Amino acid sequence: MAKQDWKPGNMVYPLPTVMVSVRDLKGNDNIITVAWTGTICTNPPMAYISVRPERHSYEMIKESGSFVINLTTRDLVWATDYCGVTSGRDVDKFEKCHLTKEEASQINAPMIKESPVNIECKVRKIEKLGSHHMFIADVVAVHADESYMDETGRFMLEKANPIAYSHGKYYDLGRQLGTFGYSIKKNKKKKC
Protein backbone atom coordinates (compact mmCIF):
# COMPACT_ATOMS: atom_id res chain seq x y z
CA MET A 1 0.00 0.00 0.00
CA ALA A 2 1.53 3.31 -1.10
CA LYS A 3 1.11 6.46 0.96
CA GLN A 4 1.32 10.09 -0.15
CA ASP A 5 3.49 12.58 1.70
CA TRP A 6 1.40 15.63 2.73
CA LYS A 7 2.27 18.91 4.38
CA PRO A 8 1.78 18.97 8.17
CA GLY A 9 -1.85 19.28 9.21
CA ASN A 10 -4.46 17.98 11.59
CA MET A 11 -5.51 14.51 10.53
CA VAL A 12 -6.93 13.17 13.77
CA TYR A 13 -10.35 12.18 12.43
CA PRO A 14 -13.18 11.52 13.00
CA LEU A 15 -13.84 14.10 15.69
CA PRO A 16 -16.68 14.60 18.11
CA THR A 17 -18.72 17.55 17.02
CA VAL A 18 -20.42 19.40 19.85
CA MET A 19 -22.57 22.46 20.30
CA VAL A 20 -21.12 24.78 22.93
CA SER A 21 -23.61 27.06 24.64
CA VAL A 22 -22.57 30.24 26.38
CA ARG A 23 -24.00 33.35 28.02
CA ASP A 24 -22.23 36.69 28.07
CA LEU A 25 -22.18 39.07 31.04
CA LYS A 26 -25.20 40.97 29.64
CA GLY A 27 -27.32 37.80 29.57
CA ASN A 28 -27.12 37.12 25.82
CA ASP A 29 -27.02 33.43 24.89
CA ASN A 30 -25.35 31.79 21.91
CA ILE A 31 -24.36 28.41 20.49
CA ILE A 32 -21.16 27.65 18.59
CA THR A 33 -20.36 24.32 16.97
CA VAL A 34 -16.90 23.03 17.82
CA ALA A 35 -15.02 20.01 16.51
CA TRP A 36 -11.76 20.83 18.33
CA THR A 37 -12.76 19.45 21.73
CA GLY A 38 -11.91 16.62 24.04
CA THR A 39 -10.92 15.24 27.39
CA ILE A 40 -7.79 16.51 29.11
CA CYS A 41 -7.87 14.74 32.43
CA THR A 42 -10.01 12.33 34.47
CA ASN A 43 -9.03 13.50 37.93
CA PRO A 44 -9.69 16.36 38.22
CA PRO A 45 -12.22 16.16 35.40
CA MET A 46 -11.12 18.58 32.67
CA ALA A 47 -12.04 19.22 29.04
CA TYR A 48 -11.11 21.72 26.37
CA ILE A 49 -12.51 23.51 23.35
CA SER A 50 -10.47 25.42 20.79
CA VAL A 51 -12.08 28.49 19.21
CA ARG A 52 -10.93 31.06 16.69
CA PRO A 53 -10.69 34.50 18.37
CA GLU A 54 -12.79 36.11 15.61
CA ARG A 55 -15.81 33.94 16.44
CA HIS A 56 -18.67 35.72 18.20
CA SER A 57 -18.71 33.22 21.08
CA TYR A 58 -14.99 33.62 21.75
CA GLU A 59 -15.36 36.90 23.69
CA MET A 60 -18.49 35.58 25.42
CA ILE A 61 -16.57 32.57 26.75
CA LYS A 62 -13.52 34.65 27.61
CA GLU A 63 -15.56 37.21 29.59
CA SER A 64 -17.95 34.81 31.32
CA GLY A 65 -15.33 32.16 32.06
CA SER A 66 -17.77 29.34 31.45
CA PHE A 67 -19.51 27.26 28.79
CA VAL A 68 -21.49 24.06 28.29
CA ILE A 69 -20.42 21.26 25.95
CA ASN A 70 -23.60 19.70 24.52
CA LEU A 71 -23.16 16.35 22.78
CA THR A 72 -24.80 16.03 19.38
CA THR A 73 -26.93 13.36 17.74
CA ARG A 74 -28.38 12.39 14.39
CA ASP A 75 -31.53 14.36 15.31
CA LEU A 76 -29.39 17.44 16.01
CA VAL A 77 -27.19 17.29 12.89
CA TRP A 78 -28.95 20.18 11.08
CA ALA A 79 -28.73 22.40 14.17
CA THR A 80 -25.11 21.33 14.69
CA ASP A 81 -24.18 22.45 11.20
CA TYR A 82 -26.27 25.64 11.34
CA CYS A 83 -24.72 26.74 14.63
CA GLY A 84 -21.26 26.32 13.10
CA VAL A 85 -21.84 28.28 9.89
CA THR A 86 -23.91 31.22 11.16
CA SER A 87 -23.02 33.94 13.63
CA GLY A 88 -24.84 34.70 16.84
CA ARG A 89 -24.27 38.36 15.97
CA ASP A 90 -26.93 37.93 13.27
CA VAL A 91 -29.40 35.32 14.54
CA ASP A 92 -30.77 33.72 17.70
CA LYS A 93 -29.62 30.14 17.15
CA PHE A 94 -31.79 28.69 19.90
CA GLU A 95 -34.87 30.15 18.20
CA LYS A 96 -33.83 29.36 14.61
CA CYS A 97 -32.97 25.74 15.46
CA HIS A 98 -35.99 25.23 17.76
CA LEU A 99 -33.70 24.29 20.64
CA THR A 100 -34.83 24.46 24.25
CA LYS A 101 -32.77 26.30 26.86
CA GLU A 102 -32.24 24.71 30.25
CA GLU A 103 -30.32 26.50 32.97
CA ALA A 104 -27.03 24.95 34.02
CA SER A 105 -26.76 24.08 37.70
CA GLN A 106 -23.21 25.29 38.47
CA ILE A 107 -22.53 28.06 35.94
CA ASN A 108 -24.46 30.94 34.38
CA ALA A 109 -25.08 29.48 30.92
CA PRO A 110 -27.84 27.69 29.05
CA MET A 111 -27.76 23.99 28.27
CA ILE A 112 -29.45 22.48 25.22
CA LYS A 113 -32.29 20.27 26.45
CA GLU A 114 -32.33 18.16 23.28
CA SER A 115 -28.71 17.10 23.83
CA PRO A 116 -28.30 13.71 25.56
CA VAL A 117 -25.34 14.97 27.62
CA ASN A 118 -24.52 18.48 28.85
CA ILE A 119 -21.09 19.16 30.38
CA GLU A 120 -20.77 22.34 32.44
CA CYS A 121 -17.28 23.84 32.30
CA LYS A 122 -15.42 26.66 34.08
CA VAL A 123 -12.45 28.08 32.22
CA ARG A 124 -9.19 27.50 34.04
CA LYS A 125 -6.80 28.86 31.41
CA ILE A 126 -6.72 30.16 27.85
CA GLU A 127 -3.82 29.01 25.68
CA LYS A 128 -3.22 31.24 22.65
CA LEU A 129 -1.86 28.71 20.19
CA GLY A 130 -2.25 30.22 16.71
CA SER A 131 -5.41 30.12 14.61
CA HIS A 132 -7.32 28.78 17.62
CA HIS A 133 -7.14 29.53 21.32
CA MET A 134 -7.70 26.61 23.67
CA PHE A 135 -10.06 27.07 26.60
CA ILE A 136 -8.86 24.61 29.23
CA ALA A 137 -11.70 24.02 31.66
CA ASP A 138 -12.72 22.20 34.79
CA VAL A 139 -15.84 20.07 34.41
CA VAL A 140 -18.12 21.16 37.24
CA ALA A 141 -21.29 19.20 36.39
CA VAL A 142 -22.57 16.63 33.91
CA HIS A 143 -26.22 16.10 33.01
CA ALA A 144 -27.35 12.88 31.26
CA ASP A 145 -30.78 12.29 29.75
CA GLU A 146 -32.47 9.53 31.76
CA SER A 147 -34.18 8.16 28.65
CA TYR A 148 -30.80 6.66 27.65
CA MET A 149 -30.34 4.68 30.87
CA ASP A 150 -30.84 0.93 30.80
CA GLU A 151 -32.53 -1.09 33.57
CA THR A 152 -29.22 -1.39 35.47
CA GLY A 153 -28.61 2.39 35.41
CA ARG A 154 -25.92 2.21 32.70
CA PHE A 155 -25.91 5.19 30.36
CA MET A 156 -26.26 4.07 26.74
CA LEU A 157 -25.17 7.02 24.59
CA GLU A 158 -25.23 4.81 21.49
CA LYS A 159 -29.05 4.82 21.67
CA ALA A 160 -28.98 8.62 21.14
CA ASN A 161 -27.31 8.12 17.73
CA PRO A 162 -24.23 10.29 18.33
CA ILE A 163 -22.49 11.85 15.34
CA ALA A 164 -18.90 12.56 14.39
CA TYR A 165 -17.24 14.98 11.96
CA SER A 166 -14.58 14.16 9.38
CA HIS A 167 -13.20 16.30 6.58
CA GLY A 168 -16.27 18.52 6.20
CA LYS A 169 -18.86 15.74 6.63
CA TYR A 170 -21.04 14.49 9.49
CA TYR A 171 -21.34 10.76 10.17
CA ASP A 172 -23.44 8.45 12.29
CA LEU A 173 -21.33 6.36 14.58
CA GLY A 174 -21.57 2.75 13.48
CA ARG A 175 -21.94 -0.52 15.24
CA GLN A 176 -19.93 -1.60 18.27
CA LEU A 177 -16.70 -3.38 17.34
CA GLY A 178 -15.48 -4.36 20.79
CA THR A 179 -15.20 -3.25 24.38
CA PHE A 180 -12.26 -1.92 26.35
CA GLY A 181 -9.91 -4.81 27.08
CA TYR A 182 -11.62 -7.34 24.81
CA SER A 183 -8.32 -8.05 23.06
CA ILE A 184 -6.84 -9.65 26.18
CA LYS A 185 -9.85 -11.49 27.57
CA LYS A 186 -9.64 -15.29 27.81
CA ASN A 187 -10.87 -17.42 24.91
CA LYS A 188 -10.23 -14.73 22.33
CA LYS A 189 -8.01 -15.27 19.34
CA LYS A 190 -5.22 -12.77 18.96
CA LYS A 191 -5.77 -10.59 15.90
CA CYS A 192 -2.52 -8.58 15.82
Image (cartoon, rainbow, N blue to C red):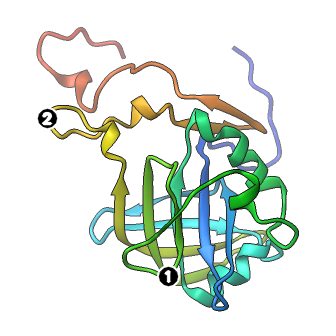
Label 2: which secondary element: loop
Q: Is residue 59 visible?
A: yes
Q: Position of residue 49 (x, y in %)?
A: 59, 65
In which quarter of the view is residue 12 placed? top right
Q: Position of residue 59 (x, y in %)?
A: 72, 83
The label on residue 152 is 2
Position of residue 83 relative to residue 133, above or below, is above
Disc 1 residue type (three-letter):
Asn
Q: Looking at the figure, which quarter contains the C terminus?
A: top left
Q: Position of residue 174 (x, y in %)?
A: 51, 21
Q: Is residue 187 left or right of residue 88?
A: left
Kindly identify the residue that appears in the image at 68 percent across and 80 percent down.
28
Q: CA distance from mark 2 to mark 1?
A: 33 Å
Q: Looking at the figure, which quarter contains the N terminus?
A: top right
Disc 2 residue type (three-letter):
Thr
Q: Nearer the viewer, residue 20 or 28?
A: 28
Kindly identify the residue that appears in the image at 83 percent across and 54 percent down.
85
Reading the image, the residue beneath label 1 is 108
The label on residue 168 is none
Q: Nearer the viewer, residue 1 or 124?
A: 124
Position of residue 15 relative to residue 122, above or below, is above
Label 1: which secondary element: loop
